[in-house]
Image (spheres, rainbow, N blue to C red):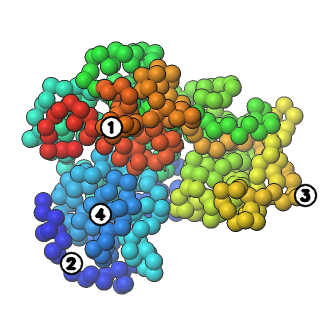
Amino acid sequence: MSKTAAKSAKPGVFQFIDVPRRMPREVPVNVRVLGWNEIYGQFDAPAALEQSARCLDCGNPYCSWKCPVHNDIPNWLALVKEGRLFEAAELTHETNPLPEICGRVCPQDRLCEGACTINVGFEAVTIGAVEKYIVDEAFRQGWRPDLSRVVATGKRVAIIGAGPAGLSCADRLARAGIEAHVFDRYEEIGGLLTFGIPPFKLEKQVIATRRAVLEAMGVHFHLGVEIGRDRTLEQLLSGFDAVFAGTGAYRYVDAQLPGQALPGVVPALPFLVANGRQVLGTEAPERWPVAGWSQAVPSPDVRGKRVVVLGGGDTGMDCVRTAIRLGAAEVSCIYRRDEAAMPGSKREVKNAKDEGVRFLFNRQPLAIEGEGVATGVRVVETRAAASGSRSVGPEVVDGSEAVIAADIVILAFGFRPDPADWLIDEAGEHLSDRRLVVGQSGRLPFQTAQPKLFAGGDVVRGADLVVTAVADGRDAAASIVRFLGVVSPSP
Ligand SMILES: Cc1cc2nc3c(=O)[nH]c(=O)nc-3n(C[C@H](O)[C@H](O)[C@H](O)COP(=O)(O)OP(=O)(O)OC[C@H]3O[C@@H](n4cnc5c(N)ncnc54)[C@H](O)[C@@H]3O)c2cc1C
Ligand code: SF4
């Protein structure tokens, strides 16, 4: 595929003036809250062409720079505009091993689309939706990554964790002729893509398709295998040429609110995972152990109940929208700052509002109230610090305490990495919050102090994004290829 050829056809450079930004059709609110399907439909070819043609090809692709995997966005938009779908699919995969997934779940307003040159005044090109279209449609028409010229090297690498970091690493190793063996303690691949992000943002069939693609590329999955319990890291290090750890961040951030041990209070992830399993049709555990939480938690029945979610990030938005679909009578989100300061995707906040979630901004939770069972959340109002500095935290408004009634309280304050001691000991270095340290003192990027052990994704960065985990897995694979002395055109 020639990028120059793709760029040469530039009819209607100013199309963005006449053609407004349009997302794919959105399922009406009253229908979508009755089920679990994704809320956006798919572009057809004319719509994808029309939206791609809004790209100005400005010559300064800030979108690409802002994208953590540095996708070659203007060029794949140009290919879509010319109807060269398979070449576009090939090009998306050059930088991104999981493009159809990032196209769905990236917070584009903070990344590629936020940096789009026409965003100011004309609204950004629908980059994420076109990325999703390219790969979904190419797969539907039978396109698959072409590994026909890959030469097997005889090298074998073990990957701990089938989340986006591990899957991305496996993809790049397979393309370099290295056998990738992915171990995961769960029964399905995907990590938080499967057991965290709800199906209305990412339908699980998308991950099943990607699994089939990776298996056809020669990636081996060993599911239901927990390293540290069923096999040791030492066994992997001695049995394989290198090991990549992409074990994620699962320690619950504990706000230590008085009353949080009351029945009716649940941390976010078990709530989402139990529901995800129910939708997948796999068994939902009745009680669920949570790292950093003192007791196993039950999956609550929220039907007809008042649900209050504490926390305004993407996990909080996933919880409120899940509770709506589960038939809660009333769903509120409490956040300690104002709306502009919310850390998650603006699109997800809008979706939650559209679906009937009530937002209580500038409220700091103080305690969970209740005798024997949670009945409410005691909050105090806040306002921005007089200094105006965000780092100082909001100020409390005297005399503003109140109780928000609740039957179920979901705590969504975020996650931290908590790698097992055996992983920390082998990796050699970690930060005070237990994030693994990689790439120090002349080592290869993503290489730990143990030369055969590499790591990336949330276990190194702390809880972050799918696309940053994908970038880490891809780049760690490049380091592994160098470490093993493999000569390969990719990754
Ligand atoms: C509820 C929720 C919603 C989110 N929504 C978004 C979103 O919309 N957009 C976005 O960009 N990001 C989102 N994120 C963040 C994103 O999901 C993570 O940043 C990303 O999944 C991290 O990828 P990872 O591969 O590092 O880890 P994970 O996805 O956590 O995968 C780690 C894998 O390692 C496995 N594992 C761990 N230890 C072992 C062991 N000892 N043996 C075997 N297997 C092991 C785990 O089972 C898991 O499958 C969300 C996170 C949460 C919690
Ligand atoms: S990977 Fe994410 S940030 Fe990059 S172009 Fe795709 S949607 Fe945008």
Number of residues whose C-alpha sits closer than 10 Å to that of mark 4, classed few (under 14), some (14–19) or many (20 or more): many
Residue 412: image quadrant is: top right
Q: Position of residue 96 (x, y in %)?
A: 30, 50
Q: Which mark is residue 10?
A: 2
Q: Which mark is residue 73?
A: 4
Quadrant location of the N terminus?
Answer: bottom left
Q: Residue at x 16, y 34 (%)?
A: 486
Q: Position of residue 74 (x, y in %)?
A: 27, 67
Q: Which of the pair 276/150 is nearer the observer?
A: 150
Tag 1 and tag 2, C-beta contact below 8 Å: no
Q: Label 4 to label 1, Cα distance in Å? A: 33 Å
Q: Residue at x 45, y 77 (%)?
A: 120
Question: Disc 2 on helix, strand or loop?
Answer: loop
Q: Position of residue 88 (x, y in %)?
A: 22, 59
Q: Which residue is mark 3?
A: 399
Of callouts 4 and 1, the N-terminal one: 4
> Could you tell me the amino acid type at mark 1?
Gly
Q: Label 4 to label 2, Cα distance in Å? A: 15 Å
